[in-house]
Image (spheres, rainbow, N blue to C red):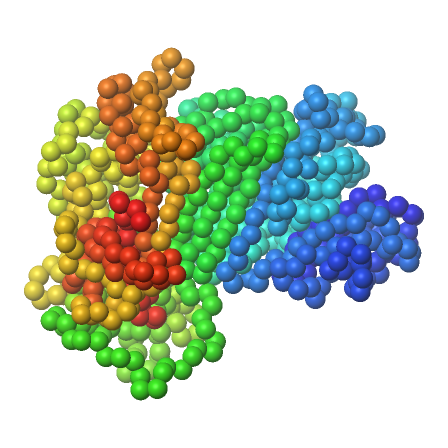
Amino acid sequence: MPVINMMVGAVTPGSAWVRARVSGASSVRLIVADNPAFAGPAYYGPVAPTGQGVASIEATGLAPNTRYWYQMELDGSPEAPTGRVRTHPPVGSPATFTFAAIGDAGLSPTSRGVGAVLNSNKVSNHPAFANVDAHDPLFTAHLGDLHYYDLGSGNHGIGGGASLANYRRAYDDVLLQPNQAQLYRNRQLVYIWDDHDGGPADWDGTHANKGNAAAVYRERIPHYELPESGAIYHSFQVGRVLFVATDSRYYRSPSSNTDNSSKTMLGSAQKEWLAGQLQDSPAEFLVVLTQNRWAQNAAPDIESWGGYSTEREELVQMFGDFGWLNRMLMLGADTHAMGLDTGAGNRWGGFPMFLCAPIDATPSPSNLSQYYNLGFSATRGQYGLVTLTDSGTQIGVTCTGYINATRWRTHQFTILTGSDPDPDPDPEPPPPGGEPVPPQTPSSIADRVRWLGCDLVTGQVIAELPDITGRVSRILGGYTTTALSMPIPLGGPGALGPVAFEATQPGTTMIVAVVNDVPEWAGMVVTRKGGTDGRLELACATLEAFLDRRYVADHTWTQQDESVIVAGLVADAQVDGIGLAVDAPPTGVKRDRTYTTDADASVYSRLRELMAVDGGPEWTIDLDWTDGTRTAVSKILRLRRRIGAAASTPAAIWTSGWSSEGASDAQYNLVEDYSDGRGANHITATAPGEGDSRPQSTPAVDILPGWPRYEHRYTPSTSITTPSVLNAHARAELANRKGGTHTWLVDARWDAYPRLGVDWRIGDDVGWELRGHRHPDGVTGSGRVIGFELDIAAGRVRPVLWSPEGI
């Protein structure tokens, strides 16, 4: 009475599903234990296998973040093999975990399928599956092409078409491969099909037998709740990370259709579901698991979203409207290659992309490096690992590509979270006698932040909005998003009536935070949610986000001052714009730039590109009162060689404890970062192109004794092709990168010296006098404020300080 195969999936903090195919048994139970000897096990079931011999059993009542062992009991007898599963950490709590992403397994000349399969060339037993298992990921996301049977095509010597029997046989054949069977038995499987495993190659919504594929998927794959009976899109949350798995086949329009609003990959039902997930989720970070490559070749192709660009723009708009664009990651497969992009190569949303294939399929050597600025690789045995490290106030993301057991590339980035995930349920009482009273400072200190609802275009104050809660943040040369909440009582002194809704209308208003009588932060309202309860939930994006919704026209600038280029770019957003004032005096640096409207580049992306060029100008959108009446807020796009006040002796100094200057009472962390992209001692600047037609600099090198070589290649601008200029950029970039980056994360009282808007603003030089376990004798230093987060409820401000000198 053997167990033919089994898989584990649909895991939560307290449960897991096991699907097993068995033979000759009338009753099946699932045995689960927290040890490999199965001492003190729990039993689930029994169930009677289906006519296909499938037993599906859920284990419940499990402990979060715990490893378990399981096996099947057939008619009272435990049967091999055993499997392992690790439950998820609690939903909504900070957690650190790693998952794997794979795709495209078949077509191998050396690792072809073993056993009695329909076609051994179309399934895989590649050792890379065992390599993935050895990393001990929480789960494995398979992004499609589980096999290459192309059912329904009549190819590969497979008779019977896209029948139920053939779809069932395909799963059996895949699980007959020892390396795959072990991985899916030991690591939760999250699986979405693509073309070769869901039907004939390049199948779409017209596939006559897609219902068979859908039925057998539900029968054999342990899956999360599926919103409908056909397509297999779904979502789940781990800790504070939302995962959305798409289905780009079931409703897909034929690739030959005209690319307009009626052409779709996802279909209207799936997009409506996706909008609901993005709007309602309390998660802090988003991972999108998709079958296809988001980026396209120069000519749109059927292997990417290139031929569905209208819908792609619709999705970018959706991600932006719900505040996810700067806190998300997209993973894809289908293209038989691996690529890693920080977001700089992603012209469609600007978020990081990770192409995680092929684990075993014919490599696709097409040149896609322009979309993957950290590298592009086409060989077998490729897969990705993603580690998410949630510390509570921020989430670190590490994407690592592997070729077999060898690490290929890594990209790390961090996002600030927007809510306190774990408030102290039992805070310690204050010491007897209360807290010490700090000395008075010369300037008055505001005791609260004022919130204003303003017209987005004119800046006119519509209403003061009391009792808003949430965190807000800013960063130089970029936009941030946040979620705010405000009460809307029906009566009493706090009732605002209709003005509350007029002052928070999505698309036409902005929320302004006034700190120490200075308008310091503004976020345009992109979504508003409210209903039965007494609160309005507002998703906001800082004003720079508007520039990401406006596109650049045709321009050619030859040896023009940077200020002219910036003013011209911003002018493209001024017609029917938000009334930006432009403060861009000449910088003294002249550049060449050519932009074309058919590149579909946003004003935001071009400004960021210009700033990213070594020695490029800095920009931000500042706020001020329009006049002395303080009834309207002006929005000012500032351009400078550097934003903020430079000072050899900073006026603003944070201290860890009371000092003669005030009571900032600062806590701190020093982040010393030599990760990929942050530190390098061997740098080459390149221009666009291929082979001999691709200009590049002479490598700039500064390798100190005892150090290995850390290489970095980058394109400073698509318009720079002169070798001497590339050499200068490489040398300048080396000076910035050779020591890595050093960032001080300070957490201090916002209402005490040094005060935001009075003693310091974004871009200013500041100082610190800090003491902690990292620096028991104290440490002093100076640097720049490159961003900040303001947490009104906690009474804290968190400036991000960049130190050019390091420690």
Q: Residue at x 18, y 43 (%)?
A: 642
Taking 31 as reference, is 664 above or below it?
below
Q: Position of residue 20 (x, y in %)?
A: 79, 49
Q: Position of residue 582 (x, y in %)?
A: 14, 45
Residue nearest the viewer, comparing 489 with 682: 682
Taking 256 as reference, is 525 above or below it?
below
Left or right of 359? Residue 424 is: left
Residue nearest the viewer, comparing 541 with 499: 541
Taking 108 as reference, is 180 above or below it?
below
Q: Position of residue 628 (x, y in %)?
A: 7, 64
| Residue 695 shows up from this direction | yes
| Residue 606 shows up from this direction | no
Q: Residue at x 28, y 83 (%)?
A: 493
Q: Position of residue 416 (x, y in %)?
A: 39, 55
Left or right of 11? Residue 644 is: left
Give the quarter of the image for residue 30. bottom right
Which residue is at the far left?
A: 628
Residue nearest the viewer, comparing 781 with 391: 781
Q: Residue at x 15, y 59 (%)?
A: 651
Q: How many marks?
A: 0
Which residue is at the far bottom?
A: 433
Left or right of 225? Residue 170 is: right
Taking 105 as reference, is 754 above or below it?
below
Q: Residue at x 73, y 26 (%)?
A: 112
